[in-house]
Amino acid sequence: MSTVSKLAQFGKKHIAKGIGRSTELVIERAKGTYVYSVEGKKYLDLTTGIGVTNTGHCHPTVVKAVQDQAANLAHGQVNIFFQKPMLDLIEGLLPRMPSPKLDTFFFWNSGSEAVEAAVKIARHATKKQNIIVFQGSYHGRTFGTMALTTSKTIYSAGFSPLMPGVHVTPYPYFQQWAAHKADPKQFDADWVGEEALHQLELCLKQRSDPRDTAAILIEPVQGEGGYVVPPKNFLAGLRKICDKHNILLICDEVQSGFGRTGKMFAVEHFNVVPDILVMAKGIASGYPISAVVSRKEIMDTQPPGSMGGTYSGNAISCAAANATLQVFDDEDLLKNCNVRSEQFFKGLREKLPELLPEGVTCDIRGKGLMIGIEFMGVPTGFANSIAAEAFKLDTIILTTSIYETLRLIPPLNITEDETKLALERVTASVAAAVE
Ligand code: PMP
């Protein structure tokens, strides 16, 4: 057995099976848009570790900041000190928030923990219990977030009883709603948005009375549910319903935030300001940190001591986040994201449809470099077979959702040539899977 397969076997033996894994690749280093296996083989990484290394792997600015910080202060426990890198981070984040009203922060380690913190804050601030979530959402795998995640049953099956007080309402998923209509042309995306708002109103009348509903929790662009962009009118409608009923709007931007959609936060595409915004992943280019931000009057309803944790807002992660923001400015990452996004969408829309056999169609959608490609009229497993073909071409791509959907999540500083290569390889993989 080769050393590489021995290492993979060792991993399989000693790492919990419950962690599903899309490849058996053993990697030991990464740089920019590429990861390198222990054999030194180079793979084009169109996953960024699921929207995390938005500045590319091991960006020199981030590496330097982490090295310097490690030599100065690794741990400044938040329940004991204010630590400088966290204060710097808040200063860097404040002007990038969708509204100056979002001015009070709490830092955690992971996206799931931050979502749970947002729910705690909403419950305490409103003195109400229920949370309404959307069909197809992913908010995490921890005990609290399992109850909020509705993208696949694998995340919660067998772990009941789950946190109570969670109600589910449909997300305006045009493509899937259309797939179940005799004539999809009978309705348009706006109608889907209005109907989803109507279903939410019904939920508030029939299942979770506004007097019991603390918050509505939504991904402004749905991630694990299939890279679904809601219709234009939807989030503004949601904001109105929340205001009318005195319900807090929590936006989970763990995946869609930090420039992923071409704006710092996806809510900015819809001109909506949430009451609570949750962020993680892209915030620190691979270092574990997440954040919840809200208005001071909401955040400060939490009694001192009820929030915090050993590694909450770790100093090295804060330094990595500060360096990440620096890279956003130095390299104008938002601009590059939008330019490369156009290149991706143009290339995919020109090339993919013509490869598909009769009866098969695809919906190429998303915003910025959060790109989903859903195939209709294909057998189950088709998207996985495309990812397997891509792997043969030394390219890592992920699938998503319960439908046959690929997702492309390259770094925001991907170059023109790398985008060209990515397009060639994705196209070749689809062609090979179709054969
Ligand atoms: N919310 C969203 C929208 C996510 O995409 C994820 C992770 N995929 C999470 C929450 C959970 O984040 P973490 O894995 O860091 O706990």
Image (tube, rainbow, N blue to C red):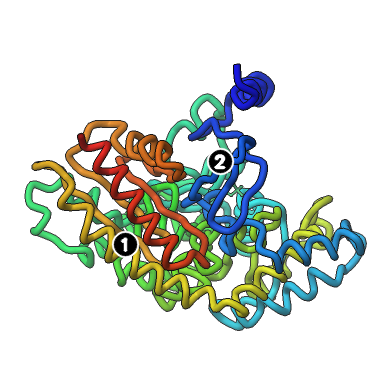
What residue sits right under mark 1 in the picture?
Answer: 197
- Dot 2: element: loop
- Dot 1: element: helix
Residue 30, how many percent across, how many down? 62, 50
Q: Quadrant of the N terminus?
A: top right
Q: Is residue 66 above or below residue 97?
A: above
Residue type of the residue flagged with mark 2: Lys
Mark 1 residue crowding within 10 angstroms, few (<14) / some (14–19) / many (20+):
many
Q: Is residue 159 left or right of residue 225?
A: right
What residue sits right under mark 2 in the picture?
Answer: 41
Residue type of the residue flagged with mark 1: Leu
> At 53% from the left edge and 73% from the top edge, which residue is drawn?
333
Q: Pick whichever, 408 or 350, lies toward us.
A: 350
Residue 373, how many percent across, how many down? 31, 51
Q: Quadrant of the C terminus?
A: top left
Mark 2 residue crowding within 10 angstroms, few (<14) / some (14–19) / many (20+):
few
